[in-house]
Structures are given as C-alpha cells and as structure tokens.
Amino acid sequence: MKTFDEVLEKAGSKSPITVAVAAAADREVLEAVSLALQKGIAKFLLIGDEREIGQLGEELNLPQTGVSVIHAENIPDACSRAVAAVNKREADVVMKGMVQTADFLRAILNKENGLRIGKQVLSHVAVFEVPGYDRLIHVTDAALNVAPSLPEKAQICQNVIRFCHSLENVEPRIGVLGAVEVVNPNMPPTLDAAALTQMNRRGQIKGAIVDGPFALDNAISVEAAKHKGIESPVAGQSDVLFVPDIEAGNILYKSLVYFANSKIGALVLGAKSPIVLTSRSDSSEAKLYSIALAVLQADNQKRP
C-alpha cells in the first residue's frame, strides 16, 4: 500500500475490528470515530465521562450503530477499562483519547493487567504520506524508546517488519540512519547500523532487507546514493527510516509534519494488540489514519 487512501480502502474490507478508546470525550477523537464508522472501518467502545461523550456525540451527529459507551469515573479508570477490554477480548485495539501519554502508557505497561508480552520491546512507528514520494515512509522509533541498545533495536526492527507486512509490503527496505553513511568507531549509531545489517544478512532479522548506516539523503534519494557511490537495494529506496534515538526521530517526525505537510498515522507495536498513540493535538484525519493502520495490524496478528 502506497497511500492512506489505499490503507482506508483495505481496512474497510476487513472483518469488524473493535477499538477501545480511553478518555474518549474529545472532539477530534470523536470526529475520527465518526469517520471510521462511516467508512465501515471499525466498531468502538468509547470509555470515559458518559455525559460528556454523549453531548459531544450529539453535536457531531455521531452514528449510534457500532458504538458502545462505557462510563469511567476518571482518566486512570478509563485507561484501565480500555486495556481490560482487550484482555477480555471485547476489543482488538486500544486507542489513546484525551489523556496524557504517560497516564495512558501506565495502564498499557501495568505488570499484572497490561498489554506487554513478557519482556518484548514496545516501539512506535509513524507512517507518512509525503508529497512527491511514491510510497509510504515509516519512521521508527520517534516516541517511545529514548536510546535503545542494539538488542532493543533488533526487536524494534522485527516489530516494524511485521507491521510492514500488514500493509502488504512483504520485503520492506529498512534504512538504518546515522549522520554519515560509513562505519565510524567514534559514532556508535553507525556501529549499531552495521551490526543490524549483518544480523539481517545472517538471518537473525528476517522478513526485510536491512542496510546501513545511511545518512538521510542517501536513504531516500537514489541520486544522492549514486553520487556517493553507494550500491544497495535500500539506498535511496528506504521504506523504513530507522532512527538512532528519540531525539533524531522526534526532529525527523516533526520536520515531515510541519515542513513537508505530510499526512500521518501512528501506532505502538509489540504488545498484545495494536495501540493507537497519537498526540492530543493531532487532527481527526491523523487519528483516522492511525485507526485504519491499527485495523490492518490487528487483522495481521489474528492470522496463524
């Protein structure tokens, strides 16, 4: 899939997926829910202040079919109930509403009742439809892991590979980024990039073509890669931009949003269910795209 229109169309063709929304009393969230219902993408459990959700739903003419409202006394209660819905198999996806990320993740990571699988690394992926590009660009991890170790990066890599497969990209090209395109012992991210490349070549990381280090230009521009004499099936054609740490990822993420005016959707991967984790300031469109991505990921996780 190369555009969000294709993602929406594919999500609408899947069997019904239920999304549990924590702290759902928010206009942008409910606008996204309304759009998703109209497109037949998902059903919803709206968890939060029942009165506020009802008032906003009336203002937005929120469809009644496919929606259940569950009252929660406060934000922590709403987050716990959303996570519990997934654990009880009443929902397939959990979504962050009008709640701070730290409070939302506290419920996700709860050792007794959360959604983490053992010691599996959870990671964030942001998907961008960038004007002028012929494919969706994935950035990982720009929001969750601050300075991942090499073993953690290997797990993040596998998370995003499985995610790309859910978008029918059977062999995604992963460009591992650094400041330069050569291995430099004084620059640890280039050493990690080289190690991930070798792990892929030896079958320790499967389902993708991984290469690096790449500077950003030669990861996304064929001309830049040729100019520097880089020969690789990933050079200039990366589907995934694997950033070295959260600072680089955050800057790249916001550059694509604000400078490039990209369309965006985002998820947290590696848990028992897909997790829609968008900013409270994100548009209803971004939240809709994130829901659609989560539907495809949930459908992929259900397969044997």
Image (cartoon, rainbow, N blue to C red):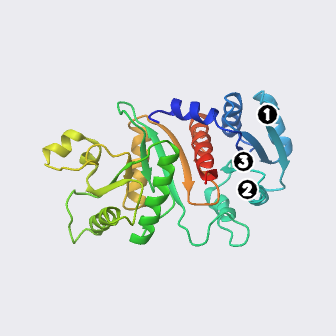
Quarter of the figure that contains the C terminus:
bottom right
Label 3 vs label 1: CA separation? 14 Å
Precedes in sequence: disc 2 or disc 3: 3
Question: Does 155 sit left or right of 283 as displayed?
Answer: left
Judging by the rendered image, the residue that carries numbered circle 2 is: 86
Outermost residue toward the front?
Answer: 304
Q: Residue at x 40, y 35 (%)?
A: 130
Mark 1 touches mark 2? (CB < 8 Å): no
Q: Position of residue 5 (x, y in %)?
A: 52, 29
Q: Nearer the viewer, mark 3 or mark 1?
A: 3
Q: How far across and down, in percent of the image, does residue 133 sit?
A: 35, 33
Percent of width and height locating residue 141: 45, 57
**Type of amino acid under label 2:** Val
Query: Callout 2: 10 Å neighbours few (<14), some, many (20+)?
Result: many
What SS does tag 1 mark? Answer: helix
Residue 176 shows in the view: no
Give the residue number, with chain letter if any, for mark 3.
Answer: 21
Amino acid at the residue labelled 3: Val
| Element type at mark 3 | strand
Amino acid residing under circle 1? Gly
For label 1, the crowd category at 10 Å Cα-Cα, with few meaning under 14, some 14 to 19 and many 20 or more, is some
Answer left or right for 123 relative to 75: left
Q: CA distance from mark 1 to mark 2?
A: 23 Å
**Residue at the spot of label 1:** 57
